[in-house]
Amino acid sequence: MERRFLLSLVASGATALTVGRPGNAWAADTTQTERSVGKPDAKHTVIEFFSLTCTHCAAFARTTMPQIKEQYVDTGKVRIVYHDFPLDQIALTAAMVARHLPEDRYEPFINALLSSQDRWVFARGVDPIAELWKTAALAGMNRATFDKAIVDDTLRTFLLKQQQDDTARWKIDATPSFVINGQRHSGGLSFDAFRKLIPDS
């Protein structure tokens, strides 16, 4: 997982940070700003509601999202907006840690967590927080920032309020769920199913 994660950082264009050495990327508090990939002026917007401890979300990230990124995001047709929808306390804590990373590290980090659920969430006898710290350190987060992230009550309140608002507005009751051009779709989508939901694709 560590090698795949580091390679994903390189592919994303992120510049490695030295663990324990804060830089300008850590200066501004952007923990509550939107997390997305794709061009801001893309014709289509997809909101993805996901939980970092959801196995169906992990399957979607592994099997469908790479094709979506290649054919729709990277070509400027689709922008994906990520909405954390944590199903349990572990997922909420992981989401808080993810949002304390520089914004360009967010997507590679959540992909790393989704692809390694069997190690940091579901392995027998595992300490999820300790394993979460290992992955955060690989992303360049120092221990002080990690410790701050996992007790960030302001961010916790923000994420839970956003989840509540999403439930009320979009009737989200399962993960993954998607709002594509204003229409809700529940469950992991295959690439063919996703393609049918994007007009002129």
Image: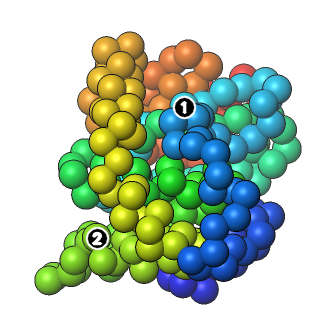
Residue 45: % across, % down: 66, 27
Q: Are dots 2 and 1 in contact, CB under 8 Å?
A: no
**Horizontal side, residue 10 vs residue 85: left or right:** right
For residue 106, which numbered disc appears in the image? none
Whether residue 163 is visible, yes or no, is no
In this rendering, the count of numbered labels is 2
Q: Mark 2 or mark 1, which is nearer to you?
A: 2
Nearer the observer, 167 or 157: 157
Task: Identify whether 179 is placed above or below 147.
Answer: above
Whether residue 27 is visible, yes or no, is yes
The residue carrying pointer 2 sits among few (fewer than 14), some (14 to 19) or many (20 or more) residues within 10 Å by Cα, namely some
**Horizontal side, residue 8 vs residue 56: left or right:** right
Task: Identify whether 83 is placed above or below 152.
Answer: above
Residue 188: % across, % down: 43, 45
Q: Residue at x 56, y 16 (%)?
A: 182
The residue carrying pointer 1 sits among few (fewer than 14), some (14 to 19) or many (20 or more) residues within 10 Å by Cα, namely some
Q: Amino acid at mark 1?
A: Ile
Q: Residue at x 61, y 19 (%)?
A: 181
Which residue does the numbered mark 2 point to in the structure image? 129
For residue 47, which numbered disc appears in the image? 1
Task: Identify whether 187 is placed above or below 1.
Answer: above
**Horizontal side, residue 19 vs residue 97: left or right:** right
Q: Which residue sits furthest left?
A: 125
The CA span between labels 2 and 1 is: 28 Å
Nearer the observer, 23 or 170: 23
Q: Secondary structure at mark 2?
A: helix
Q: Earlier in the sequence, mark 2 or mark 1?
A: 1
Q: Secondary structure at mark 1?
A: strand
Task: Identify whether 114 is placed above or below 174.
Answer: below
The quarter in which the C terminus is drawn is: top right
Q: Amino acid at mark 2?
A: Ile
